[in-house]
């Protein structure tokens, strides 16, 4: 999943952080550039 405007707009960051906080699996956000982030869903064990 690519999330645009993560670091440019507080509302986008807040929404993403709230959503990811509800997940049972820890998620790493990888920085693509100054505003976009990449999430890779972990595989099932």
Image (cartoon, helix red, strand yellow):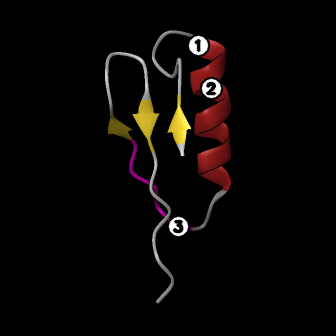
Q: Is residue 21 left or right of residue 2?
A: right
Q: Which residue is mark 2?
A: 14
Pinpoint residue 7: horizontal percent, then vertical percent: 45, 17
Q: Which residue is mark 1?
A: 10
Q: Nearer the viewer, residue 7 or 43?
A: 43
- Outermost residue on the bottom side: it is 45
Q: Is residue 28 magenta?
A: yes
Give SS at disc 1. Answer: helix
Tell me if residue 31 comes above or below residue 10 in the rendering.
below
Is the C-beta separation of discs 2 and 1 under 8 Å? yes
Q: Which residue is mark 3?
A: 25
Tell me if residue 32 comes above or below residue 29 in the rendering.
above
**Residue at 46% over, 55% down:** 27
Is the C-beta separation of discs 2 and 3 under 8 Å? no
Looking at the image, tell me whether mark 1 or mark 3 is earlier in sequence order: 1
- Outermost residue on the top side: it is 8
């Amino acid at each position: 999943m690519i999330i645009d405007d993560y670091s440019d707009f507080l509302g986008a960051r807040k929404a993403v952080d709230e959503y990811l906080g509800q997940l049972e699996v820890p998620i790493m956000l990888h920085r693509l550039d100054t505003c976009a982030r990449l999430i890779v869903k972990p595989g099932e064990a």
